[in-house]
Structure formats: structure tokens, C-alpha cells
């Protein structure tokens, strides 16, 4: 190491929105070009940590940007990325980098005469994360006003492999996601504030397992050819809460993680905050409240899942909410207001938002206030838990209280060696999120009156997995594909999957 200092008629409205959602997508090259325009001077927060993704930097020589916005191509010492920041005052700043690189190489971060050099860290854990956070030793000296911060590999460079895909495995060459900048005092205060409002997830450990449903805007009914977004209000009106609760009860689940939004931002209940942002996206019936109340009556708790409409299936919500503004504060505040309204409406019966999807890859680049989001989630229930998805990377923020990652069909668990203060997954309650149906998370195409192939593993494998996780005290939330039309006219879950869950219930609950 070397350190030197120096958005009139409901049916018309929904149809119009869906047409927008199906509009042709921007090419990968155009996306890269758009991202490259998001430059300029980044103001540093005086009392918090500032996040700046690689897509906001100036790239030199061989350095390029992936479609997913990670920065790569560090082949020589002349290959650099540089950000211009504005510091509120002269000070010493702690620097963290989020990146992937298989082998160890020196990484240099500099600002004028102030230089930090340290060997990169390498993956010593099993499974995820596929990229990680490294806090460099020492501090970087910044002056009040504008500063230019540069990152490069000063010595031997790793081979750049064209097949490398950031986030889908550990890359051979350096793939840089972001830089985090904050004083030691600001970082310590951030952690202390997160600890002071931490929710209670012990009931999840005690309850052992729950059920996850993706009631998506793109989900299809048991019959019919159109996604739920086309008949959003009808889907809410026809939803039979007792049929749903009966099915969940049969699984033995201690909790349900129910979809508030997924893909299209359609909220199946009143939400005045959302109405202010984009009228026509809420429902008069309080379906979410009815689900919470009925499940609570049966001793089953409720968490919500939320997707901030980030990946191209929905083209109108994020701009309306402020995600395309130069200053992303309006977006951050709008999401916080939606979360706060829900928490205050449902109070202590809503156990939190256990899974806010896409956090690290889609909302983190906007440098949203995770603290504001966490406090909003807890507005009506101080013990509510906040889970911000890190997916294939490290923890998003100290304000995330669960390990939240897309486990797919894998019957695994987070590596306990990287859970704890200062570790890659952070000081969180270890949890696992996975799916059972071979077809994935939700019915994204017509079902034609038939369910899919069924479970991804044998009944014996699932029973053994749930037993093992109960012993390890790692709560499991497993997803079952649910029909978009929840009625008593047909099963809402694949009967083959329900049969597996009944065996799991007997094994874990003893009845």
C-alpha cells in the first residue's frame, strides 16, 4: 500500500399506458450514449456518503462502458476514469469502490497529489456476490470546491476478456460499478443512524419460512391472452382474498411477501402519494389492506415487495416520478412518500417492505436516500424491516436489514462469513429468496388453462433444504407462480407445487 496526501377514462388511460409500455426500446448503443451525457460536477454531501457510478465519469483510452453501465477496459496505466466532484470544504475523505476482478492487482485512486494505492481484494466466499465493495486504506485529501478524482490500475493489468459480463460471475478484468465518497465522521454517523432505527426480523427467524408471490403487471390469468396491466382494476375487483389466504395457509407459511408493484407501477389499493405523481395507477378497493387483515387473523404476517418500474417494461412511471431529472431528489422523495403512505395506512400489521427490487443496479445509481426510504417504511411501524436488493452484489446501504438477493431456483444460503459489520453483505439478518416453479417467478405469457411443469427440485430436496435452513436459522421466502385472476374458479398455484409445500409444512410444522 502507498498513501500520499497532497400518469380521464380509466380503460382508455390504461390502454394508452400499455401502448407506451410496448413501445420499441432504445438500442444498446443509444443507451450507452445517453448515459455518457450524464456528466458534470457531482456535489459531495457534507454529512453523508455520496455515490457516483462509473457511467458518470470521463473515460479515457481503452476504457469503455457495458450496456449494464459497468466500466471496463483497464488495459494500461493510461486507461482511466475520472469524476469531477465539488467538496463542501477542505477535508479527508474515505473512498470505497464497487467492482469485480478475479485476480489481485493494485488499484489507484488519486486527486492531485493525494494518492491511494492498495491491492484489490479477491473473492474468498462461495456463490454471490459477484462484485464487491472495497474501502481503501487511508484518506483522499480534497479541497473545498471542484476536485478531479481518477481511478486506474497503475501496474500489471489483467487480461480483458470480451465474454466477461458484470454481475453474472466474477470478471477477469476490472469492471468498475461505482465510487463512494464520504468522511470517516459521516460514514460512522450513517451506520449509527441505521442501527438506531433497525427493525425486528427475529419473527422471520422464528417463523422459518414464508411465501413470495409476483402478482405482476405482466402476469396472465389462468385463461386469457392479455397481461394484468390491461385489466388492472378488474383484477383487483375480482381478487378473492379468502381463496388466497386459504392457499397460503395450506403451505404453512409464517408470512407472505405480496406484490405492491412489479414491472408496471400499478398499486392495488389507495395510495394518495402515488395519485399525486401519476393519477390512475391506484385502486379504490384496498386489496392490500384486506390481505393484511385476513392473513393477520390467521396468524400469518405480511411484508410487501416493490419494483420501481426500472427495466423497460414500464416507460412512464419513472420519468413522472423524477428519475430522469438532473437532480434525482424528486424521485427519491416520491418513492419515500409512496412507502410512507403505505406504512402509515397499515401500521403495525405491515411488517415492512422486505424486498425492494433492483436497488443496487437501478436505484443506487441515482444516489437515492436509503435512509429516507427506510424511515418511510417504518413510519407506521418502527419495527418494520427494510430490504433493499443487492441481487448479485454487496449490501446496498447500512439501512438495508436483510440479505436480499434473487436466488432463482438455487437451494443455497448466503455465506455467513460475509455477513456482519463491515463485511460484504453487511450487518443484516441472513435470509434466502428463491423460486419453485420451473417457469420462473410469474406467468409472463398466456397460461391457456394449464399450469407449467411444476417444482424445480424433488419434494425430498425441498424438505431437506427447509429443514437445513431452519436449523441454520436462515428464513426462506419461496416464490410460487400465481394466476393473475385470483378466484375460486381454478387453483391459483400449481397443484404440484402446493403438494410440495404441504410436505414442507408437515416436516417443519409437524402438522
Image (cartoon, helix red, strand yellow):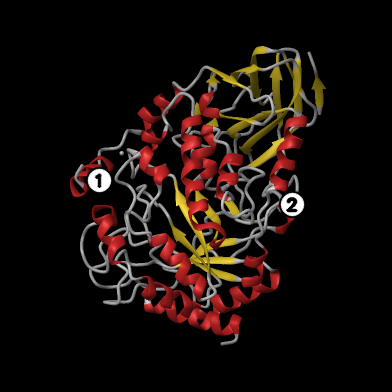
Res. 456 in view: no
Q: Position of residue 483 (x, y in %)?
A: 33, 67
Q: Do labels 1 and 2 touch, CB within 8 Å?
A: no
Q: Nearer the viewer, residue 3 or 285?
A: 285
Corner quadrant of residue 460 = bottom right
Corner quadrant of residue 95 = top right
Q: Where is residue 72 in the image (x, y as percent from the top left)?
A: 55, 31
- Vertical placement of residue 442 versus 329, above or below: below
The reply, left or right, for residue 284 in relation to residue 355 is left
Q: Mark 1 points at which residue?
A: 18
- Vertical placement of residue 20 versus 330, above or below: below
Tag 1's secondary structure?
A: helix
* Quadrant placement of the C terminus: bottom right
* Quadrant placement of the N terminus: top right
Q: Position of residue 338 (x, y in %)?
A: 46, 45
- Image depth: mark 1 or mark 2 in front: 1
Q: How many marks are shown on the rendered structure? A: 2
- Vertical placement of residue 233 versus 324, above or below: below
Seen at 48% across and 51% down, the residue is 342
The reply, left or right, for residue 85 in relation to residue 243 is right
Q: Where is residue 346 in the image (x, y as percent from the top left)?
A: 50, 57
Seen at 66% across and 31% down, the residue is 49
Choose the circle earlier in sequence order: 1 or 2.
Answer: 1
Res. 357 in view: yes
- C-alpha distance separating marks 1 and 2: 43 Å
Q: Mark 2 points at which residue?
A: 420
Question: Which residue appears farthest toward the bottom when viewing the image?
Answer: 511
Tag 2's secondary structure?
A: loop
Q: Nearer the viewer, residue 152 or 352?
A: 352
Q: How crowded is mark 1: few (under 14 residues within 10 Å), some or many (20 or more)?
A: some
Amino acid at each position: 500500500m502507498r498513501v500520499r496526501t497532497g400518469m380521464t377514462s380509466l380503460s382508455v388511460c390504461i390502454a394508452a399506458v400499455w401502448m407506451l409500455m410496448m413501445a420499441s426500446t432504445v438500442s444498446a448503443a443509444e443507451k450507452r450514449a445517453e448515459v455518457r451525457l450524464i456528466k458534470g460536477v457531482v456535489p459531495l454531501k457534507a454529512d453523508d456518503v455520496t455515490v457516483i457510478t462509473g457511467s458518470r465519469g470521463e473515460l479515457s483510452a481503452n476504457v469503455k462502458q457495458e450496456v449494464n453501465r459497468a466500466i471496463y477496459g483497464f488495459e494500461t496505466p493510461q486507461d482511466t476514469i475520472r469524476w469531477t466532484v465539488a467538496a463542501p470544504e477542505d477535508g479527508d475523505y474515505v473512498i470505497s469502490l464497487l467492482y469485480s476482478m478475479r485476480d489481485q492487482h493494485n488499484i489507484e485512486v488519486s486527486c492531485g497529489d493525494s494518492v491511494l494505492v492498495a491491492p484489490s481484494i479477491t473473492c474468498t466466499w462461495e456463490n454471490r456476490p459477484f462484485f464487491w465493495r472495497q474501502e481503501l486504506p487511508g484518506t483522499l485529501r480534497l479541497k473545498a470546491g471542484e476536485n478531479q478524482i481518477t481511478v486506474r490500475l497503475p501496474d500489471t493489468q489483467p487480461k480483458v476478456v470480451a465474454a466477461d459480463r458484470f454481475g453474472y460471475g466474477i470478471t477477469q478484468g476490472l469492471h468498475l460499478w461505482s465510487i463512494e465518497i464520504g468522511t470517516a465522521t459521516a460514514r460512522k454517523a450513517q451506520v449509527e443512524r441505521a442501527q438506531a432505527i433497525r427493525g425486528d426480523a427475529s419473527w422471520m427467524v422464528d417463523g422459518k419460512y414464508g411465501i413470495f408471490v409476483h402478482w405482476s403487471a405482466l402476469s396472465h390469468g389462468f385463461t386469457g391472452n392479455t397481461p394484468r396491466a390491461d385489466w388492472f382494476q378488474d383484477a383487483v375487483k375480482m381478487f378473492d382474498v379468502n381463496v388466497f389466504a386459504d392457499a397460503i395457509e395450506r403451505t404453512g407459511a409464517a408470512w407472505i411477501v405480496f406484490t405492491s408493484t412489479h414491472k408496471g407501477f400499478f398499486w392495488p389499493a389507495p395510495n394518495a402519494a402515488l395519485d399525486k405523481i401519476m393519477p390512475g395507477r391506484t385502486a379504490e378497493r384496498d386489496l392490500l389492506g384486506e390481505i393484511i387483515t385476513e392473513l393477520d387473523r390467521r396468524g400469518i404476517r405480511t411484508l410487501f415487495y416493490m419494483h420501481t418500474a426500472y427495466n423497460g417494461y414500464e416507460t412512464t412511471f419513472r420519468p413522472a416520478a423524477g428519475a430522469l431529472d438532473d437532480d434525482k431528489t424528486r424521485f427519491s422523495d416520491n418513492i419515500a412518500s409512496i412507502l410512507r403512505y403505505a406504512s402509515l395506512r397499515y401500521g403495525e400489521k405491515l411488517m415492512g417492505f422486505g424486498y425492494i427490487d433492483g436497488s443496487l443496479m437501478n436505484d443506487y445509481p441515482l444516489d437515492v436516500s436509503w435512509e429516507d426510504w427506510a424511515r418511510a417504511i417504518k413510519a407506521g411501524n418502527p419495527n418494520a424491516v427494510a430490504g433493499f436488493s443487492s441481487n448479485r452484489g454487496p449490501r446496498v446501504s447500512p439501512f438495508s436489514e436483510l440479505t436480499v438477493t434473487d436466488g432463482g431456483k438455487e437451494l443455497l444460503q448466503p455465506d455467513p462469513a460475509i455477513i456482519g459489520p463491515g463485511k460484504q453483505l453487511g450487518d443484516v439478518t441472513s435470509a434466502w429468496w428463491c423460486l419453485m416453479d420451473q417457469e420462473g417467478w410469474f406467468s409472463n405469457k398466456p397460461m391457456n388453462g394449464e399450469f407449467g411443469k411444476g417444482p424445480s427440485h424433488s419434494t425430498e430436496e425441498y424438505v431437506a433444504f427447509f429443514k437445513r435452513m431452519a436449523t441454520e436459522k436462515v428464513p426462506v421466502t419461496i416464490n410460487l407462480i400465481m394466476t393473475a385472476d385470483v378466484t375460486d374458479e381454478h387453483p391459483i398455484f400449481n397443484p404440484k407445487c402446493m403438494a410440495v409445500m404441504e410436505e414442507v409444512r408437515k416436516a417443519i410444522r409437524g402438522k
